[in-house]
């Protein structure tokens, strides 16, 4: 690899030598090429380190710090073993580790880099449907008041800034004065909701999707908190125009997960299971499966979590090795083993 970098770097030395002679003295092309190669390698390592640092807090249960404990009432050192056990269940699912001595060749790496494909397994744990990371760490995340993201590359920080913008007075103004196209689109969708929220929905299933989209704009990046004003608007519309039962159940399910009312979410999930399995409408099987499994685990219904996990597996559209599916299985297995040990 180093030799290849040097060959590529040496081709540019002539340009550097011609235009920037101070950087490349005559006769030192090999030396300059080696320096460029080393700098490229260091920059690559810096990017890797930056990515690792960005998602390090999302490596579920790997950290030893006390804030990574699921139950903050327990000492951190007593929770490390439980988290390590869950991680072991996650990794002990047929995943073949890579090795510097026996590397697994990824022949699609060049294609993925060209297409700008990115691994989104760990970031998706806190951006898809509900904040899974904050839920497992039992740390509520309240809405922020800053409409400008401090870390725009972080999905959660970016989502929180959008929510702050929607809640501010700027959401009532003109969208063409907003610098960010993403923020302007969010404000436009919010204004659309404000215009139609008191009208009878012509299609309840599409209305439920619209409610979910607007809720994610307002509350993206939050966890463990309820948006009472927005929830009241949704409830008024459902009561005034007699919303069908599946619409009410989907709203109750998502609302229970967002506010950590897991018993309410688990009850709504039970009502939605026949709908998702027979009609394939209103809510996707993967969203229902993810939320129902954790709602039942946190409600103490381990058998129910296993039943939902296995029942909805055949309806999943994810690949078999998807991180979220493996993580669900690992948590259910860990809960079953702890229950078996406690009963001895």
Image (cartoon, grey):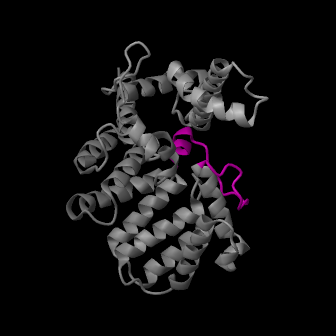
The x, y position of residue 252, in whole percent, is 43, 63
Vertical placement of 53 versus 161: above or below?
above
Q: Residue at x 52, y 30 (%)?
A: 61
Q: Is residue 125 left or right of residue 34?
A: left
Q: Can residue 298 be seen at all in this image of the molecule? A: no
Nearest the camera: 300 or 156?
A: 156
Residue most extreme to the bottom: 199
Can residue 261 be found in the magenta stretch?
Answer: no
Q: Residue at x 66, y 35 (%)?
A: 15
Please tell me whether the stretch drawn in magenta is mainly helix, strand or loop.
loop
Q: How many marks can you see?
A: 0
> Hey, which quadrant is residue 324 in on the image?
top left
* Start-end of magenta stretch: 131-154
Q: Is residue 75 left or right of residue 341?
A: right
The x, y position of residue 286, in whole percent, is 34, 51
The x, y position of residue 273, in whole percent, is 28, 57
Q: Residue at x 67, y 63 (%)?
A: 164
């Amino acid at each position: 690899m180093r030799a290849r970098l040097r060959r590529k770097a040496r081709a540019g030395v002539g340009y550097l030598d011609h235009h920037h002679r101070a950087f490349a003295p005559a006769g030192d092309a090999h030396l300059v090429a080696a320096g460029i190669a080393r700098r490229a390698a260091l920059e690559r390592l810096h990017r890797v380190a930056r990515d690792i640092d960005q998602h390090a807090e999302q490596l579920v249960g790997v950290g030893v710090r006390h804030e990574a404990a699921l139950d903050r009432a327990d000492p951190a050192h007593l929770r490390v073993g439980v988290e390590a056990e869950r991680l072991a269940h996650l990794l002990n699912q047929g995943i073949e580790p890579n090795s510097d001595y026996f590397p697994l060749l990824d022949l699609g790496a060049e294609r993925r880099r060209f297409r700008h494909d990115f691994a989104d397994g760990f970031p998706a744990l806190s951006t898809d449907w509900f904040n899974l990371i904050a839920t497992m760490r039992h740390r509520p995340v309240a809405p922020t008041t800053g409409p400008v993201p401090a870390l725009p590359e972080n999905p959660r920080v970016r989502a929180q800034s959008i929510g702050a913008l929607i809640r501010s007075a700027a959401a009532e103004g003109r969208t063409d004065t907003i610098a960010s196209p993403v923020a302007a689109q969010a404000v436009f969708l919010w204004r659309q909701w404000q215009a139609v929220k008191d009208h009878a929905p012509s299609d309840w299933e599409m209305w439920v999707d619209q409610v979910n989209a607007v809720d994610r704009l307002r509350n993206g990046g939050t966890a463990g908190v309820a948006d009472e004003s927005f929830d009241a608007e949704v409830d008024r519309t459902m009561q005034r125009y007699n919303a069908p039962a599946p619409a009410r159940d989907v709203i109750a399910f998502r609302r229970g997960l967002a506010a950590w009312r897991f018993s309410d979410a688990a009850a709504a999930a039970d009502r939605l299971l026949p709908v998702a399995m027979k009609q394939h409408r209103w809510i996707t099987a993967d969203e229902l499966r993810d939320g129902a499994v954790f709602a039942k685990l946190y409600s103490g219904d381990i058998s129910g979590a296993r039943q939902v996990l296995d029942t909805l597996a055949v309806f999943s559209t994810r690949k078999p090795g998807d991180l979220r599916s493996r993580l669900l299985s690992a948590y259910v297995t860990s809960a079953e083993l702890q229950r078996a040990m406690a009963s001895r």
